[in-house]
Image (cartoon, coloured by chain):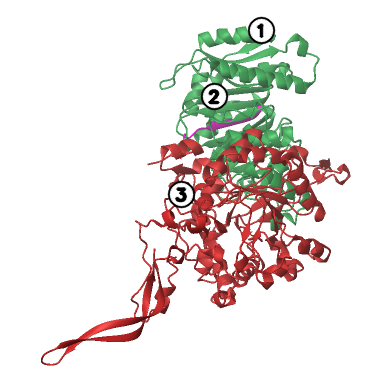
Amino acid sequence: MCRLVAITSKDYISPMENILALETMKEGHDGSGMGIILKNLGGEFEEMKDYPILSGICSKDGLHRLDEYMERVGFQLRHTWTPRIKPVKGIQRRDHYFARVYEYPEEYKDRAFEEKEDLLLRTRIALRRMGEDDESIIVFSFYPDIITIKEVGDPLQLSEFFGLDDSNLKAKIIFAQGRQNTNYAINLYACHPFFIQGYGSMTNGENTAFVPIREFLMSRGFPGYIGYNSDSEVFTHILHYTCKILGYPLVYYKDIITPLKTSEIDGRPDSEVVRLLKVTLRPLCIDGPNCVIGFTPDGTCFMVQDSKKLRPGVVGGVKGKYGLMSEECGLDSAIPQRDRSLDIFPMKYDMVIVRPEAEEVVVWNQLRG
Amino acid sequence: MFSIEPSVILRRTIHSEGPTPQPKAVRQVVTVIKQSTDINRYCTGCGTCTLVCPNEAIEPEYNPQHKFLFHKNRGGYPYRRGGRRNDPRLSTLDRLKFTRISMLTDPALDAGRHEFRIRTYLGRILPAEELPLRFVNGRLEVDKTSGKFIPPVREIYPVMIGSMSIGALSPTMWEGLAMGVTYLNEVEGMPVVMCSGEGGMPQRLLKSRFIKYFIPQIASGYFGWDEIVRTIPHMVEDPCAIEIKYGQGAKPGDGGLLMAHKVLRLIAEIRGVPMGVDLPSPPTHQTKYSIEESVAKMIQSMSMAWGFRVPVYPKISGTRTARAVLNNLVRNPYAAALSIDGEDGGTGAAYNVSMDKMGHPIASNIRECYLDLVKQGKQNEIPLIAAGGVGKTGNLAANAAALFMLGASAVAIGKYIMQAAAGCFGDEYNRCNICNIGRCPRGIATQDPKLYRRLDPDKVAERVVEVFKAVDVELKKIFAPMGRSTELPIGMSDGISADDPAIAERLQISYAC
């Protein structure tokens, strides 16, 4: 079962905090992959929040083709971050790891953000397809104020490999996952966290309802609903579909993935809507076991459980810094100064929501709405 | 193949007695059991002989070398019968097994202690993008000012009792089924629903609050619908749904047929016809010009009759053209579902050739329809109801679960419940199968009081309840190890495998051996 560490803070933090928290949970991940998403970036990216950042890995040939493609579309390279790679035994080095900041093509500069988002998504998909067969181009995200790093290996060793301990990479929201490979071949695209158009999530567990959910998402006609190398990628896409495509408030994500029983719906003030959603979005119901930790574009972070099996998940911290993690030992590592008695272990009806800038924690109860 | 009958014969016997015996002929009139070689008096295997023989000396025995079909066409009349397709081979459904078992990486559920939601929806479901919702004070609410029609949707148990008419079934059988269904709803909290079949329903039931558990069917003969339409103003509850029958899996291309033997007073009254006449429904609705308009109009008319509060859906026989029908219905916003009846469905009366050689198996038909919906992104908008051979060999729960995973939202059963609840003799070796002539030895498919008195409706109802409670447990025993409990695993095709590569390829599932 994968181990998850998300930290949201009002101050910029280093991804090493996440890595060290993951290290405390070492028995739960097998080195089959680590993924990190940094959101609300600091350091050298702080002044470039409006520019899209392409995160990925390329071979020499792949990078050449990537440059050609980006130039053809009209993206201009503004800044490049590359990790200072230190060889570590057991980690196979690839040619180029990067986070590249681009300027939008000239004709897009004055367009609405939705149009820019659409271009970024199409570009990311095109690049992914260009390098999918020979793994010459692997792209994880292409979005402003977001960096994604993924590689196969143990998280602590990977932090050494990428030189994260002495890099100036910082962010206010950092999600990290230490992967325990269960059902699929080791593939970087299967590594959490997943990201699409401002929404990200990671999950521990196995998604038993994967196939009908995947079929439903893939048939929405939205070009970004592809991939699914991991059965957990659908959680990110359901989040995106709920909040971005349908425009529903975040709490309805819980109603969609774990619908209430009919008798329970009657107690909700918005029962009429909840009843409709339960029927209309039936194929998006999950059956677990899953604990989902996610974020939305405004910097809200949340944790929800499936309705029956439940995976480990705990939220705790102090005002200005909260951790959402799969194990409490990770919280002890990242935020030792917190009052442990206030830690929240969400159960089947709960959605724990941490407001942007880690301002406050709210437990939304699905029964009461 | 030959039947026996009681008879009286003059028997001549030779007696030789005394020290120098002289043979003497003695003639006696005796009662005997005689075998008939008349093809029209063939042994149906009903087994009544075993019930009456005091010495337990006789019983029906199937002769696999029979030449029955070579001769059962005397007078130029092809063989007609009731029952099911005479094909005892395993159906595709029985060649599927559940292979995705939750082990270690995903804890299995406990079928006995966890809560399972084995329910489905009957009715047209709006896609989320079309729901008239608006955002008010941090919550969503239904925008009543939008004028958007939200179609009615019923939450039902996913195993339904399919269309079997009063007329085809005896009063005791139909009453038993109806009582069982009502008990399941009222006492057990299981929303099992039942379709009336063609020919109307008793006025008392139409006007009762229990009508919500029933689906009146309108078919091409429109039998019984004068009475139903006249009753609408007096109905205190809406029916669960309305089924429009366009076809039947057992006899594709044929309309319903209730033979004169069964049209007695009660049936004549309910159907609004004279007694003792054959009631053949046309093969199709005479008003039907095309699916685009006439079927749409029929669906809309029926919807309108109940103020658009009742789901209305068509039922067709399994066919290679099912996808074409489905794709038309998808474009009709009032079509509430599509019921597809596969070739293994049963019937009260049909030509043998129709039953044995016409039709399409349900498994691949439902799968291709579901995958077509997936391609269009409408897999949750128009539920597919699968019927025809569900539980053919007794594995009702397994067949139903397999159909859900292939894409059905619900299944309908007929023969299964007749066998399980009333002990129907029929089988795939042409045993009995005389539902058409009104002489059902079990009292299930007859209007003869001497015969239907053999069936106690209370016992039928009790068995219906037992069957559904048992199926519910079995479905849980299937879903629990697969880790599914919150919603019906519709389209969870990674959960099943076929034992034949060709079947697996056709159904787009895995092959396991």
- Chain B's colour is red
Say which of marks 1 and 3 sits in front.
3
Q: Which residues are magenta?
A: A172-181
* Residue pictured at 66% horizontal, 11% vertical: A79
Chain with colour green in the figure? A
Q: Which residue is mark 1?
A: A72
Residues at marks 1 and 3 on the same chain = no
Q: Chain of mark 1?
A: A
Q: CA distance from mark 1 to mark 3?
A: 57 Å
Q: Which residue is mark 2?
A: A150
Q: Secondary structure at mark 2?
A: strand
Q: Which residue is mark 3?
A: B91
> In the rendering, at what x and y percent does residue A124 appear?
63, 19
Residues at marks 1 and 2 on the same chain = yes
Kindly report the secondary structure that dominates the magenta region of the rendered protein.
Answer: strand
Q: CA distance from mark 1 to mark 2?
A: 27 Å
